[in-house]
Each structure stands twice: as structure tokens, then as C-alpha cells.
Amino acid sequence: MKNLNKLFTVILLLLCSLFLSQSNSYALVYPFNLSLSGLQEVPPNASPATGNISGTYDDISKTISFNITFTGFIGLTTAAHFHGPAAPGVNGPVLIGLTGFPLGVTNGAYGNAFVLNPTQETHLLGGLVYCNLHSNIFPGGEIRTQMILDAPLPVELSSFSSVINRNNVKLNWSTASEINNSGFDIERKNTNSIEWTKIGNVIGNGTTNEAMNYSFSDLKLHSGTYNYRLKQIDYNGNYEYFNLSNEVNIGTPSGFYVSQNYPNPFNPTTRIDYDLPEDGFVNIVLYNAVGKEVSVITNEFKPAGFHTLQINGSELSSGIYFYRITSGDFTATKKMQLIK
């Protein structure tokens, strides 16, 4: 019996250890954005060629993903590699060949992803890897850069998109992993402006290696073109920005529309939304239950677009009321209830 108890205890400890190790596992994503030049070759050369390599390294999948652009080569490209181990200013052997790199050209672009073995990862994280682009004029390398990674990203954003419904915008974004993520400030600006405005906040999920989905709705926008971005903030107050890649265009309504007031019933204020597909005079009148005019809410020229007005019933008695909107040939009437 004692042996069974000991065996049970050992199994329980192993399961707890496995659970804790899995629950504490999360991705560190290291970004990089580096310039290649002949001056970084060993020895330096006078080539006017320039290049750039940008991407990320994920320490869970052990994957380095990157894109390279280059231009202005004196010679024609013959090969491209990651070399190492080699400190800055030192030459090293080929570590990874960049298969499929464009050859026989003086400018171009290339992208790829490689899974690193433990030795290659150690060299990369230790700053002992360099990217080298070779040519027939400079067989030892025409341009190169040392692969120095930036600090790991607190959040790896996998998608960020927008959906438009009339004059409402819903933003959707997903993260592949998060580290100490306090949350996201949502910021918006008119395309013609340089000033960003915070319009909301969404709480983050701290530290997780699971995919997380978020959304935020920006309502009742005027016609216009807008930009959005996320300000991701960690628990220490550090932050980074993620920009929505597309502009959001809120156009002119395709037809007349008037909403049911909200809230309804109400006390003492309520709102009405209405859409105008063209400029024109708008007349909105409030009637009581027997059809007697109570007040003229608005009677003025309005531009085409999406509009909202507020009705204040503080001077009215409880009961049923009707509001009628007229603009050009369009007329609509709706019922509302005031309860005090």
C-alpha cells in the first residue's frame, strides 16, 4: 500500500511539473531591421550597393523569417548566406545557404524562413551571425550586415482589419503570443490630420502563448476618411504601435434613413439617427398622442451625411409621442414613449 502511495505521489508530481512547464511556455519574438553595405565587409569595399534585411525570430518555433532587398551591385549576384559563428569584424564559415536567392542580377528582393538547430540559434541570439550577399566582382561578399536582433516584442500581432457598416467601424485584431500585455489603446485620426486621438481601450491577456482575438467598435462617424492604430502597452508602461494598413472611408449614405429613437422608452433624453444622401433642409417635428404639434426639433439646412440629434423631454409629460422627419420628398414617422 505504501508503495502504491509513493507511486501515486511521483506520478502526481510529474504531472504537476509537466503542467507548470507548459503553462509557463510562451514565445519570444525578436524583430530586426538591418542595413547591408560594403563598408561592413571584412575587409571593407567601396561598392555603392545597399541592402536591407528585416524580419523576426520566434524562439518557440525556432524560426527566422525575413525579407531582403538589394540594389546598386557592381557585380552580378552569385550567392547569399548566413555566416557564423563570427563576431563583428570577423569572417566566418557558411551557416545557412539562402536557397532560391536571385542570381546574376544587380538588384532584387528575396524572402524566406528557416528553422534553426540549437547551435544556429545560440549563434544568432549571441550576435555571432552575419548576412552576406556575394557577387562575381566581390566573391567574398559585396554587402553584409551583422544580425543583431532587437529586444523581443511584447506582442506578436497576427492580423488587424476593419469592417464598415454604415457609419460604424469594427476593428478586429489577433495576437499569436503576448508577454506582460496590459492592453491596447485604440487611436484614430482623420487622414488629413497629424493628430491621433484615443477613442477607447481593450484589456490584454497578460502573458500567453495562445492566439487571442480582440475587437473594438467605433460608432456614429461622420463622412470622411480615417486612419486607425493600436497602442499596445505592457505592465511597465512600455508601448509600441500597430497601424491598420488600409484607410477607412465613411462615404455619403446611399438613401434616406431615420432610426428608432434610443433609448426607448426614455427619461428625459433620447437620440435619433438620420441619414441624408444629399444636402437639403431637414424638418423634424414632435407630436403628442392626439397629433398635436408639441415642438419643432430642427428646421434647418443640413449637409449630406450621417447625423444624430438629441431630444430633451424634461418639459414634457409622460406619454406616447411621435416624431416626423421631412427632407425633400422623404417623410418618415416613428413612435416613442416618455416615462417619468
Image: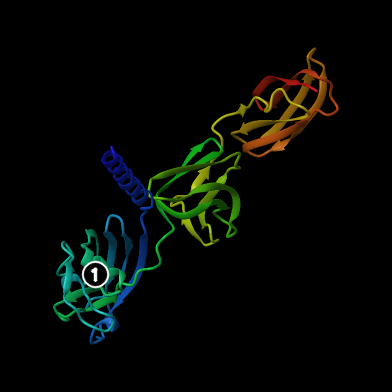
Asked which secondary structure carries label 1, the reply is loop
Quarter of the image where one finds residue 126: bottom left
81 left or right of 276? left
Q: Residue at 28% of width from left, 62% of height from top?
A: 67
In front of the other: 233 or 296: 233
**Dot 1: few (<14), some (14–19), or many (≥20) neighbours within 10 Å?**
some
Where 288 sits versus 242, above or below? above
120 left or right of 286? left
Tell me where residue 275 appears, x and y as whole percent.
61, 32
29 left or right of 115? right
Q: Residue at 29% of width from left, 62% of height from top?
A: 66
Q: Which residue is mark 1?
A: 107
The answer to whether one can see residue 225 in this image is: yes
The quarter of the rendered structure image containing the C terminus is top right
The answer to whether one can see residue 279 in this image is: no
Tell me where residue 145 appears, x and y as whole percent.
29, 75
Tell me where residue 262 appears, x and y as whole percent.
67, 28
Tell me where residue 125 appears, x and y as whole percent.
31, 69
Farthest-out residue, front = 2
